[in-house]
Image (cartoon, rainbow, N blue to C red):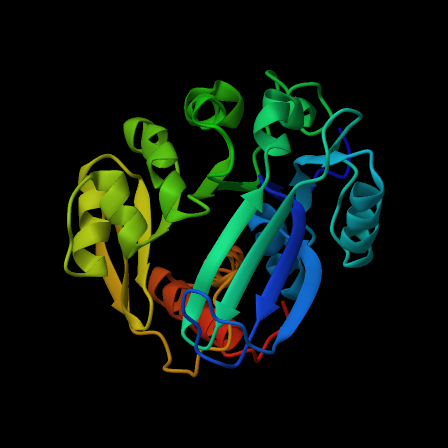
Amino acid sequence: MTDIPKILCIGSVLWDVIGRSKSAMRLGSDVPGRITQLPGGVAMNIAMTLRRFDLHPALLSVVGQDAAGTQLISEASGLGLICTHIYRSDDLPTDRYMAVEGANGLIAAIADAHSLEAAGEKILTPLYDGTLGNADAPYSGMIALDGNLTLALLSKIASDPLFAAADLRVAPASPGKAERLRPFLDQSRATIYVNLEEAELLCQSSFETATEAATALVTRGAARALVTDGGKLAAEADASGVRHACPPQVLVARVTGAGDTFMAAHMNAELHGASPQDALEQALQAAARYVSGETAH
């Protein structure tokens, strides 16, 4: 094995089709705005943010052997992402995600993203066949996982010795998939990144603050938990205690991808030796710049 990337992003790689308007929207609104198509998906968003920090992550996912897939690989490679380990499927289409955002936040979204679940373990082949790791020499870098993977696959990763040497970081992708992260509470193996709503779903409890939620996640078995709560206080908890920080107050221009930016910025800070408190603050600052529109998608 040669030239093993230090960071892997495993999960959703797709086209984001985002409609944004500067107007506040409600059910049935018909307003002017802009529609863009960009490389997206949780794993892709994390990888693109890491690349902006001058890191070189590799993607493990599935992309179809269709025109959309070829274009997506071309654009991602052009951004400097390592795409050589992505599984190219002959019979599965390239996934897509469509969202509508107004001045008052995310209005609605639809994920046409069935290929990732259908591909299953095939996307992990490089970690088993010696390309990036095997039973004798497991991959030992940092891995960002997203909850778009199936519960069965996430359970396997949480308990498989092939992942025991890796620094696992996991996010649920959306509140509806938060409970898929439960295997990482059972195994106490990963750092979990969630917002307050996702923490409540994962713990099946209600929390008043991010601090309360992060503490509860660690109590339930998480090795470490970071919980955000929009513009309110964010918290990180592990066996050593709890840390807090307030995000900068900014005018929100977009929300899709904010959690991915927070996670990637936190990973980058820790890779560069930041203290836990500094890493939390740097991640919140990066996420605030993103939602304000100051940084690129």
The image quarter in which residue 250 lies? bottom left
- The answer to whether residue 163 is visible is yes
- 82 left or right of 265 in image: right
Q: Residue at x 76, y 24 (%)?
A: 91
Where residue 293 sits in the image (x, y, percent)?
56, 78
Quarter of the picture containing the N terminus is top right
Task: Between residue 8 and residue 197, name the one nearer to us.
Answer: 197
The image quarter in which residue 78 lies? bottom right
- 39 left or right of 77 in image: left
Quarter of the picture containing the C terminus is bottom right
Q: Is residue 67 above or below residue 214?
A: above
The image quarter in which residue 216 lies? top left
Q: Residue at x 29, y 38 (%)?
A: 222
Where residue 23 sits in the image (x, y, percent)?
49, 81
- 254 left or right of 196 in image: right
Q: Is residue 89 above or below residue 24?
A: above
- The answer to whether residue 137 is visible is no
Q: Which residue lies furthest to the top in this view?
A: 135
Where residue 187 sits in the image (x, y, percent)?
33, 27
Where residue 49 sits in the image (x, y, percent)?
60, 61
Q: Which residue is drawn at 43% across and 78% down?
A: 24
